[in-house]
Amino acid sequence: MTESSARGAVDPRLLRRARATRAYLVAGVAAGTLTALLIVAQAWLLATAIAGTFEHRDLAAVGATWLPLAGVFLARGLLTWLNAVLAQRSAAAVKSQLRTEILAARLRSRGPAELDGAGLVSVLTQGLDALDGYFARYLPQLVLAATVPLVIGIAILTTDWVSALVVALTVPLIPLFMVLVGWLTQARVRKRAAIQERLAHHFADLVAGLPTLQVFGRAKAQAEGLRRTGEAHRRETMATLRVSFLSALVLELLATLSVAIVAVGIGLRVVDGQLTLFIGLFVLILAPEVYLPLRQVGVHYHDSADGVAATERAFALIDAAPLVTGSRPVPDLGAAVIEVEQVSVTYPGATEPGLTETSLLLGPGEMVAIGGPSGVGKSSLLAVLLSFVPPTTGRVLIGGVPLSELDQDAWRAVLAWVPQQPALLAGTIADNVRLGAPDAPTARVRSALDRAGAKQLDLDRTLVAGGEGLSAGEIRRVALARALLRIDCGGGQLLILDEPTAGLDAATELTVIAELRRLRIGTLLVSHRPAVLAAADRIVELAPAQLSHSAGQL
Ligand SMILES: Nc1ncnc2c1ncn2[C@@H]1O[C@H](COP(=O)(O)OP(=O)(O)OP(=O)(O)O)[C@@H](O)[C@H]1O
């Protein structure tokens, strides 16, 4: 049995999530009990009317009961409406809380590679929307299934114990079949969720790589792959629906046969004179109502399985190991030396280290360039300093304090970073430059852009996410301006730059180098460009694994 099925269909982690859910469950139990009492009253009134009509051979009994009956119908309608409203509200509250928690967990997590775009989007959108079925249909039904059969069972027991015995013997068959159907459904739903995620990945990859695929004439082949995944998704959805419909049919059949057994018993005893017509009718009207809520749970189990699969993925994201943070304050980088001691990084699942035993020193105000062939681990070293990746061996000391013991938020607050592939967000150019210094005055934003060689870029120009419409060089300039502004106005004390001048012309490169030198703050940069390497105080040349002992010089 899987962890989730052991946990049952009502995941306590989900119920803990929203206050609205707890209040809703309490209200649901009250509404369920009230519904059951109304059903008993309805059966009583109907039996009175019908038996009265037969026994006295006039319609006086009908006349006396139609008003209370109308009241019962109205009250049941109101309760159903109330249940639906409460269910929708609690679904919305839980979904909104889970979305917030998932995004917060993503922000707490270490590196950029842990959760990936399309999977995250799939969970946040369709994934969590599956909770609507869980809250709006399954959970209310579960509450009804717990209250209604009990109340009605007691009503039957007090009037006809023989029928109560038949009901008591046949009712457990429904949950039994439901569990069997549930096992089948759960595996199918998981498979469907996995295919849905694959479809999302496929689609995201296709859209991102469309121009490349077009140029290489592979767009059609990719579309074919997408069609195949879509077809698999359709097949799985149909299979899930088939199981769901069949399960409803089996449960329906079981309930009908059980009611038929009760009916035959009642019929024989009424004919024999052992039972009055009124009691017979009363029990006969009530009997199907015992099975109905249980049967409906089976029907809505399908909705619940979708919701449970969604929450499993949501909780996997929320519970994923967060960035472990220490609590020590960050030493003043104006005086502290950064020491990288024999650091190596082996990525999960990799056999070879991505970075092999590397050491270096970065003094206050120093600019150190890291060189070396492609794939030797330069970006990995920067990732260690950015706390994206923990060192597999070795350690990093900041002013003598291990990096892992520092308050990680405070550490990141002193960093200014230009990644190899800078990310621009939807908004104006000014918004993007202000990312690390939100309160910086406009004049400083303008100056940062000018210093980064982006005089021509208009502050108010609106960008779409990803910086579409800007050249690769312009994107890098905006990213550089962002780092410069972080140093100027955002508390940045250490510059970490990955290929800061890639895509820039020689003249702009010189301007940027001059600006970086003028800052006189600790700068660790990766570059292959001779002009940048020449401007650095020192160059640390990384070498592939077998030569690593001769590299990593201080
Ligand atoms: N997230 C990751 N998961 C697994 N392996 C990775 C990951 N990131 C990098 N690697 C591997 O680690 C090694 C070092 O990569 P890294 O990006 O640090 O090299 P680099 O020296 O910066 O290369 P380049 O100069 O081409 O940017 C490579 O073999 C790379 O495939």
Image: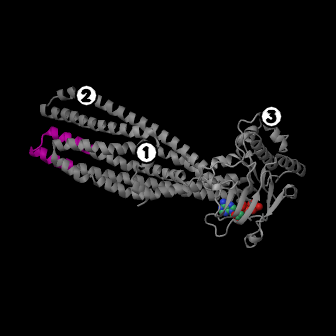
Which corner quadrant holds the N terminus? bottom left
Identify the amino acid type marked 3.
Ala
Q: Is residue 553 left or right of residue 65?
A: right
In the rendered structure, does residue 276 fall within the stretch colored magenta?
Answer: yes
Q: Residue 199: x percent and y percent? A: 59, 55
Residue positioned 22% across, 28% down in the render: 65
Residue at mark 1 to residue at mark 2: CA–CA distance: 38 Å
Q: Report if residue 247 is visible in the image.
A: yes
Which residue is at the front of the view, 19 or 287? Answer: 19
Q: Quadrant of residue 183?
A: bottom left
Residue contact between numbered discs 1 and 3, judged by CB atoms under 8 Å: no
* Above or below 8: residue 15: above
Residue located 83% across and 59% down the image = 538
**On the picture, is 50 further left or further right than 105?**
left
Extent of the magenta region? 261-289
Residue annotated with mark 3 = 443
The x, y position of residue 314, in whole percent, is: 52, 50
Tag nearer the camera, 1 or 2: 1
Picture quadrant of residue 354: bottom right
- Which residue in the protein does label 1 denote? 15
